[in-house]
Image (cartoon, rainbow, N blue to C red):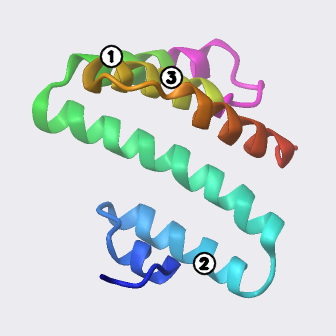
Amino acid sequence: MKEFSLENIAENIHFGKTKVYFTEVLSSYHNCNYRSSVVMLWSVSVCDIIYKLQYLVDLYADSAAKEILDEITSLQDSDKKSPFDHTKIKQRTLEVSAETFDFEPYPSFSYTVRLGEAYEY
């Protein structure tokens, strides 16, 4: 069995941009900048979700992914000065995933949201 390490996780990241961003997270973590690494990891996870949604739309014409991306676009267009609410993206993505794959996302998601909100400015 392979030993767990953050570096091993980084090797398995599919999207190139996400891998580069995650390398920055690791750098912050290794330099003991833990708060920064948590905030950056939150942003990287949101970016990765958007990249995956776009990939599903481009490759498979996935209607659920397109619907989520359209919701994100309308949220951004509705108020350009308002801070973007990342939790809505994650929640909506998990709702669609739960419907598709038949699992209950909310207990762990709620914890993640609380953790992420603790570091939002």
Q: Where residue 81 appears, x then y in whole percent?
A: 77, 26
Q: Where residue 52 appears, x then y in whole percent?
A: 33, 43
Q: Which residues are magenta?
A: 72-86
74 part of magenta stretch: yes
- Going by the numbered disc 3, the residue's amino acid type is Ile
Examine the image and state in which quarter residue 99 appears. top left
User: In what quadrant of the picture does the N terminus appear?
Assistant: bottom left
Examine the image and state in which quarter residue 82 appears. top right
User: Disc 1 or 2, which lies upstream in sequence?
Assistant: 2
Query: Rounded to the nearest whole Å, what is the CA distance between mark 1 and mark 2?
Result: 33 Å
Tag 1, which secondary structure? helix
Q: How many marks?
A: 3
User: Disc 3 or 1, which lies upstream in sequence?
Assistant: 3
Q: Residue at x 43, y 62 (%)?
A: 18
Q: Which mark is residue 26?
A: 2
Look at mark 1 in the image and give the residue it sits on. 99
Tag 2, which secondary structure? helix
